[in-house]
Amino acid sequence: MTPNIAIAVLPTPGGKMSRFTSSKKRIAVIVTAAVLVLAGGGAAFAYWTSTGTGVGSATTGTDTAFTIASTTAGSALTPGGPTDTVTFIVTNPGTGNQNLTAITAAVATSTGAAWTTVPGCSAADYTVGTPVVIFGTIAPAGTLTGTVTITMNNTAANQNACKGAAVPLYFAAS
Amino acid sequence: MNTAPPRHGRESHGTSWGALPFVVRAARWGTTRWGTVKWGTVKWGSARWGLAVLAFVLVLALAGGAGSSPAEAFWRSTGKGVGTATTGTLNPATAVTVPATSTGTLTVSFTASSSVPAPTGYYVTRTIGSVASAACGTSASALITALSCSDTVTVNGSYTYTVIAVRATWTASSTASAAVVVGIPTKLVFTTQPSAVVAGVAVSPGVAVTVETSASVAVPVAGTSITLAIATNPAAGTLSGTLTATTNASGVATFSTLSVNKAGVGYTLAASSTGLTGATSSAFTVTAAAPSKVVFTSAALTATTSASANLGPVTLALQDAFDNAAIAPTGGYTVVLTTTSTAGTTGTVFAPTTVATTTALVRFAAGVSTTTFFYGDKRVGTPTLTAAITGLTSATQTATITIGTPVLTFTVNPAASVKQNTNMTPALQVTIADQFGNVGSGAVTLSISANSSLLGLLGTIGGTTTVTAVSGTATFSTIQINGLLAVGNGYTLQAASTGATSILSTAFNVTL
């Protein structure tokens, strides 16, 4: 951890100020420094430190799950055929910044389970690429857009079962 | 799945300080360890220290105010989403078409798959019953891109064809075509046999020959050329008409103009076609047509002159236009016989028998095809005999009439009294002729036949005693009776000629 060192130029109650009057140059230096500090970091002002107690409450927010929408562009998939590009949009529906650090895409059901809807056709018949997105913080109601590719494999086996299949894509963001 | 992240976080950016006003973070790169600076602990008496503090503060101020951004706080979260990608499909070829029938080689055509992208190619299968096999020389690994192909089937049957579109691992089978009945032509069969027919008349009904499979199923293929010929030919007949015909759509070739010109029993026809096993018809009979002519069927004959019908039998026959022996119809035919003999009607005779001396009717009785007649002619020669029947073509034949038995006749006998050793005058003449006056030829020899005188026995005949007849007459100009003792009475001369009966002259005396 980086140590923090605070320099406070505070008037301390009961403190000696006469040493600074002996030299106009020193005073000027100090005044200049004070001015500069105030100019860069805000106006400093002197105050007394004190203690006290009181009560109050504030409600801390919480994270809200990202929402991900996608659209697929390109022609229908065929064995060994064209690569479709799926554009996904990760939205932060919450009220606070949320940081997106990872996202995965796969052929799977909406619950992430193996896709078995079409007998004879499975996720193994397709290849989903690595999502491409610039991760980062998403402001409330903000979005991040990325893309991922999907192709249909040209296997050694007959893939007639996959003809016309709607291939479900499952995105998981974190 | 999701590791719960901290519920909040703070992070610095780059090398800047995360700072709130009046709160700074020490830089990592600081080489000087700074402790907390408390008011009054710095020895300000040193100008250097003062400047250093001032510079440091200035740097901090500048770094915090101009070169850094505020740190940001955020929540960590997770989320999920779904999407869909669409898998294409491969549509099959459509409208697979084959002919309704085939002789073994047929064309399969179809409409291309409507898929985009298009199939890589197609392969074709043919199915009979429940058994499918590769067709058109195609297979899953031997695709075609053309929209038609030719397939050769070697087994008869009813087939359907299916076209399978292929793209990568996808296949799409078309709806099967309509059935094509394949019948491979193997042999010919007479499906309408030739029937008995009259010579020269077209066989009716027409002979039909059908192309069939090995299983004796007609092959409905048009255009096969089939040729007929006589296989068994009992009467050296000739097959006429259109001898080559092509099959119709039912695979049948019909021969409607066949005819045979010679009557006979046991004719058969042979059908042939390139590449097919031929066929032989059943036997059939060709009968003669109606008589169209009368002909002499016997060789030309020779006979001697005669008052009766001695030449024959001469055979006449009825024939049709193709020279087949024909039979006389009901009522028969009467034959009119004539001759060119100079003997005329009184010197000639036609008769059914040899004994007739007068012309009698010669007839073809009903149902017969031949008849005979005899001919007699008193005149030597080669008369032309003509046989004629009304309505038919007549016939002629030359007969040869030779002289009948020669008869010698002294047309100039010796004088009643002749001198010995002296030529008889007038010259003796002997003629050679038959009984009808037809002169003959040959040599005539005279000799002393007899005398009634004792002395006469010593006489001899002199001169040229053998003379060849000229125009039937032998003239003896130098005949003498010689000898010292030839004088006598009752001489006769004998004339002789080969084939003729010798004759005697009148009697004469020989004197000194």
Image (spheres, helix red, strand yellow):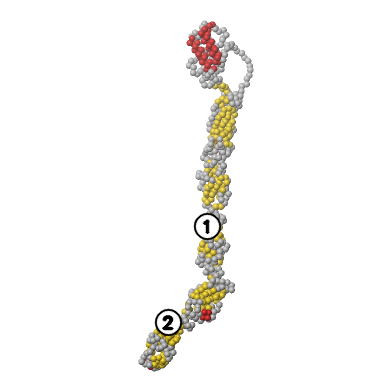
Residue closest to the eye, B33 or B178: B178
Quadrant in which residue B196 is drawn: bottom right
* Residue B434 image point, x, y percent: 47, 83
**Label 1: few (<14), some (14–19) or many (≥20) C-alpha neighbours in 10 Å:** few
Residue under the image location 50 percent in, 44 percent down: B141
SS assignment at label 1: strand
Q: Quadrant of the C terminus of chain B?
A: bottom left
Residue closest to the eye, A61 or B344: B344
Q: Chain of mark 2?
A: B
**Label 2: few (<14), some (14–19) or many (≥20) C-alpha neighbours in 10 Å:** some
* Residue B491 image point, x, y percent: 41, 91
Q: Relative to residue B334, is residue A146 depicted above or below? A: above
Q: Relative to residue B150, is residue B225 depicted above or below? A: below
In this view, the residue farthest toward the front is: B426
For badge 2, the amino acid type reads: Val
In this view, the residue farthest toward the right is: A56
* Residue B262 image point, x, y percent: 52, 67
**Residue at label 1?**
B225
* Residue A84 image point, x, y percent: 55, 35
Query: Which of the two discs, 2 and 1, labels the residue nearer the N terminus?
Result: 1
